[in-house]
Image (cartoon, helix red, strand yellow):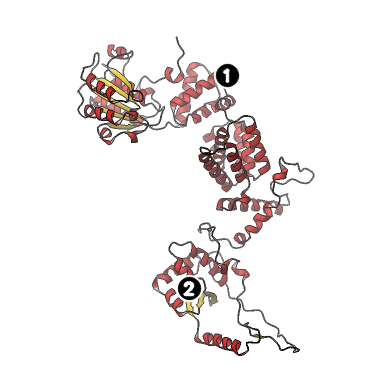
Amino acid sequence: MAHLSLYRKFRPATFAEIVRQEHVVRVLKHQIERGEVGHAYLFTGPRGTGKTSVARIFARAVNCERPSDGSPCGKCPTCLALSENTLDVVEIDAASNNGVNEMRDLREKVQYPPVTGRYKVYIIDEVHMLTDSAFNALLKTLEEPPAHAVFILATTEPHKIPATILSRCMRLDFKLIPEEDLERHLSSILDGMGKKYEKEAVAAIARAGAGSDRDMLSIAEMCLAYGDTLTYEGVTAVLGAADFETTASLVNALLQSDMPTALSTAEGILAEGKAVGVLLKDILSLLNQVAVAKSCANAEKLLSLPARLFAQVKTIAERADGSAILRATEIFVKTENELRFASSPRIALETAVLRAAMPQTDRDTDALLVRIANLEKQVAALSAGAPAAGKQPAAEAKPAPAQEFSEKPAPKKAARETEWEESLPPPPDEPPFFDEPLPPAWDEPPFAREPQQPQLRETPQPQAKSVQKPQSEPPKSAPLPSADGPRDAETTFGLFLRRLRKLPKSGVLYALCRDLEPSEEGGKLVLMTDIRTVADTLNGEKHRAAMAETLGELGVSDFEVRYASAARTEEKDGVEQLKKDFSGYTIEVKS
């Protein structure tokens, strides 16, 4: 007898043997038990989830003389007749019989009554492949079929079927099968065959099946041909995946920003003949496992890896930062899409490796978070008296491969670029800053700018001695109360402008507030302007409400927009007049 594939040999014969799909089985069994069989059904869902198998069981069950719990008994004359080739159950492949002539032929033959059973069942697989003319030829038959005819349409793409066909069918959607059910099904098959296997190998095959029972059994058949015992290493070899330890070394180097090691490891894997797409898939799979190990308490059960391999994944997860894992995953997911159109897939992959391993060259938010996390680790290590993370003592230092490509000044550069964020952190609920430049008046940290106050200085006549009086330090404003501690008026106003920039439709309000002069009076934030129109506009109901809401998020509840007094205006006019009268002198205004 010819060899049968596993998915053919172990095809379900009753509803009880169907893996999952309880919602579909329950509907069909109840209709059979009540004698309420419909005339047209539409089975939809991913490939390998049991659509055709359920259709065949249903075709035998509606004709069975003594159905058992809705399933065919398999012993009555009708069941025995239907188990072989029969005219009462007709299977049509719409992919190769998609023309209007085939549907016209079906419409003529459907009028003939069944030979052995009560119903004549037509199973049309991949029905979405029919042409428009074929659908039109089938439409009238579906609308008013003979009493003995039952149509079962199966497809993986229901959106391609005309609405007129869909409205005449009872639609039943098949779902992907969970990995746990696939593992249980495969284990029962292997036990029945008397095959030895490792639980981790069964879990790996179920994971590779991606919710499809047929795909899982096809992979299992290849793995069984690889060796007498089903092992995890054998499954990995059959699937063409790279060595786990090598891939783990690559992922660890990526997450630790060790560019030379990451690039040399990727080069080594590709040099062994591994396809670029396979390596990219392995990297994404391992990054996913690291993310699960990082965030889930029951990660060992979820991943179902051998203890030795899970220990490696757990070690990588403990050393890596969550932002680095997320950033690397996003980079390689984007690269996976780009590979479809890349003329040099290897270069595209290596570019992704370089970008993931060198966050100091990237200025997006995730890269900055990774760099800040690395700096925090180094500071913690230095505080504990240990060498910084990723560095070895001079006596034990080993030259890393491709050392000439490493960039030594990177940590210093990262420290300089993050100095402003570290010195002035945003509130916890504030979204990341935009990459657009800050307004010129706030390019520097607010606390670095000292308020300038008027001081009159007259350039002396030639040969005249200038006596400079000692100046006292300008008075500093008292700190304002806030949710995260006291802040001075300058700092609070700087954060206010930053937050205001990110509000939708706040361009006019931001432009009006940009030139205000902040100060503090008795715990109140005073914003001064020399233009009366600006003061009146900001004190209006609309703009004042927006300012109050934004300042409230910073912990400031009391503020005032004030127009400069007339005395100050007269003082400025007097200074201007003084400059005109003594145009030959250099006059500067100080306090």
Image quadrant for the C terminus?
Answer: bottom right
Q: Position of residue 97 (x, y in %)?
A: 33, 23
Q: Of helix, strand and loop, which one carries label 1?
A: loop
For marks 1 and 2 on the same chain, the one whose residue lies earlier in the sequence? 1
Q: How many marks?
A: 2
Q: Which residue is mark 1?
A: 227
- Residue at horizontal 25 percent and vertical 34 percent from the top: 164
Side of 159 where 294 appears, left or right: right
Image spot of residue 414 (x, y percent): 65, 55
Q: Position of residue 590 (x, y in %)?
A: 63, 82
Amino acid tagged 2: Asp
Residue 496: where, in percent of width, then height? 51, 67
Residue lying at the far top of the rendered structure: 1
Q: For mark 2, what is the residue? A: 558
Q: Nearer the viewer, mark 1 or mark 2?
A: 1
What's the amino acid at mark 1? Gly
Question: Neighbour class for label 2 at 10 Å: few (<14), some, many (≥20)?
Answer: some
